[in-house]
Image: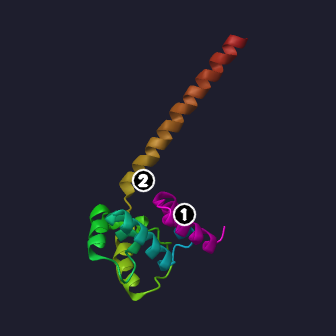
Amino acid sequence: MGKSDLMDRVTTDLSRGHTYPAIQRMHSLVAAHPTDLDLRRRLAAIYRATGNAVEAGRWSYLDDDAEPAELEAFEGRYPAHRRLDALRWPNGAPAPTDVSRVRLAPLLAASAPAPKPKTRRGSRLQTAAAVATLAALSALVIVGARTALDWIF
């Protein structure tokens, strides 16, 4: 189903007071077009109309006209390292506006995994444990095979 068809259905749902299906349809559209700020703005407007400030802030976070109270509600609900996932912004996609670039930059930095230090001690210990486990399993296989052969013959 095309974008305009879904938008028509959203409009129909909202005119009938059916916000849940309208929200579900808008989520589908945003998932299909994650960098379309207009779709995000419309989804935020539906959440705003239902009184859900956290979700309104979530979907208007990259918008120039986002409400400060909604942004605070969103930021209060999601810690900095989880906000990028909550926004469902595609990895590596360029931000279309200056405001969205400014808001995405710290989220990208906060969500980047910290480099894991390499330690030789841990890798040697893991290797020794793996060798010991393989030796024990080999011994069990040999004993099991011998026992099975003794029973057969």
Specify the farthest residue to the bottom.
98
Q: Is residue 146 magenta?
A: no
> Which quadrant would residue 62 be assigned to in this image?
bottom left
Q: Earlier in the sequence, mark 1 or mark 2?
A: 1
How many residues crowd around disc 1 within 10 Å: few (fewer than 14), some, or many (20 or more)?
Answer: some
For residue 82, say whether it is visible: no
In this orientation, which residue lies closer to the viewer: 71 or 47? Answer: 47
**Residue 25: numbered disc:** 1
Question: In the shown orientation, is residue 35 left or right of residue 52?
Answer: right
Q: How many marks?
A: 2
For residue 24, say whether it is visible: yes
How many residues crowd around disc 2 within 10 Å: few (fewer than 14), some, or many (20 or more)?
Answer: few
Which contiguous range is marked in magenta? 1-27
**Residue 123: numbered disc:** 2
The secondary structure making up most of the magenta span is: helix
Question: In the shown orientation, is residue 1 left or right of residue 24?
Answer: right
Say above or below: 109 vs 116.
below
Tag 1 near tag 2, CB within 8 Å: no
